[in-house]
Image (tube, rainbow, N blue to C red):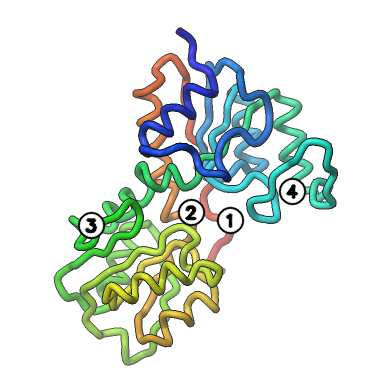
Amino acid sequence: MPTHVADVLASIEKLSGHPLHGDEGVQLGPADREVRRATVCWMASRAALLSAERDRADLVVAHESLFYPYDTRLKAGEVQPWEAWPTNRQRREIIERSGLTLARVHGSADDICIFDVFAEMLGLGTPLVSGPVHKVYEIPPIPLRRLVERVKAAVGMDHVRVSCSEADIERPVHRVGLPWGGLGLFVNVSYQQWALTQGCDVLIAGEADSYGFRFSAECDVPMIETTHEASEIPGLRKLTAILVERHPDVTWYFYDNGNPWRWM
């Protein structure tokens, strides 16, 4: 039998062990269509959507919010000022022109594999504290400087930002928390606070900002930033491979959004 959008989303629910969250599911395009070609990406950016259009995809499965501001969704009959913003307008035009269906899979993908793939990349081993995405890792004591080098090698980055003083650089650390994705940002400091209550003496984050860095730094816990994309794109590659196995009648493509900025 052919695969439909609902079948793909049902697979996501089965893999995660729970229904889709409120910010997940079809966000634009027909929800009942047959899927012969599909693209998975971190964000449905203009470039990602143009790639899906060239591949004649029926479905795009994206991890991040389709429109700006964050997690904004279209409602039938409403017209919002942000719909005319060039970024949003271009994305919607490509989706409508190419007849794509856009589905978001956010927290469910984190639960399925994104978090675990990030931890595996970093070589952290078996978690000491283990929940779906609330995990703490115990590693042999290692100077912060050496852990930073290990993280850079794991994610393929020449430079990372670290919240630490000069005196902290050679300090041994051993209990690691992972505020992956955007959980190093100030709006998500509750995750940092949870990690601190678990005795973490170092955090390895996805994306962080000044407020986020200062939160744990004031508790003398350094945080290493790898970028949002670096902490999540590898897990989305694995999710694509899982979907290939689940739906072999669909031709699957993966679009790597990469990093939107560069060191200069």
Between 168 and 157, the one lying in front of the other is 168
Q: Residues within 10 Å of mark 2 (few under 14, many from 20)?
A: many
Q: How crowded is mark 3: few (under 14 residues within 10 Å), some or many (20 or more)?
A: few
Mark 2 and mark 3 residues within 8 Å of each other at the beta carbon: no
Give the SS element for disc 1. loop
CA gap, disc 2 and disc 4: 19 Å
Which sits earlier in the primary sequence, circle 2 or circle 4?
4
Residue positioned 39% across, 84% down in the render: 164
From this viewpoint, is residue 226 visible?
yes
Instruction: Examine the rendered structure and indicate whether residue 36 appears above or below residue 20.
Output: above
CA gap, disc 4 and disc 1: 14 Å
CA gap, disc 1 and disc 3: 26 Å
- Nearer to us of marks 1 and 3 is 3
Residue 150 — which label? none
Quarter assignment of residue 100: top right
CA gap, disc 2 and disc 3: 18 Å
Q: Residues within 10 Å of mark 1 (few under 14, many from 20)?
A: few
Q: Mark 1 = which residue? A: 260
User: Position of 238 compared to 51: left or right?
Assistant: left
Q: Mark 3 = which residue? A: 123
- The quadrant of the rendering that contains the N terminus is top left
Q: Mark 2 = which residue? A: 229
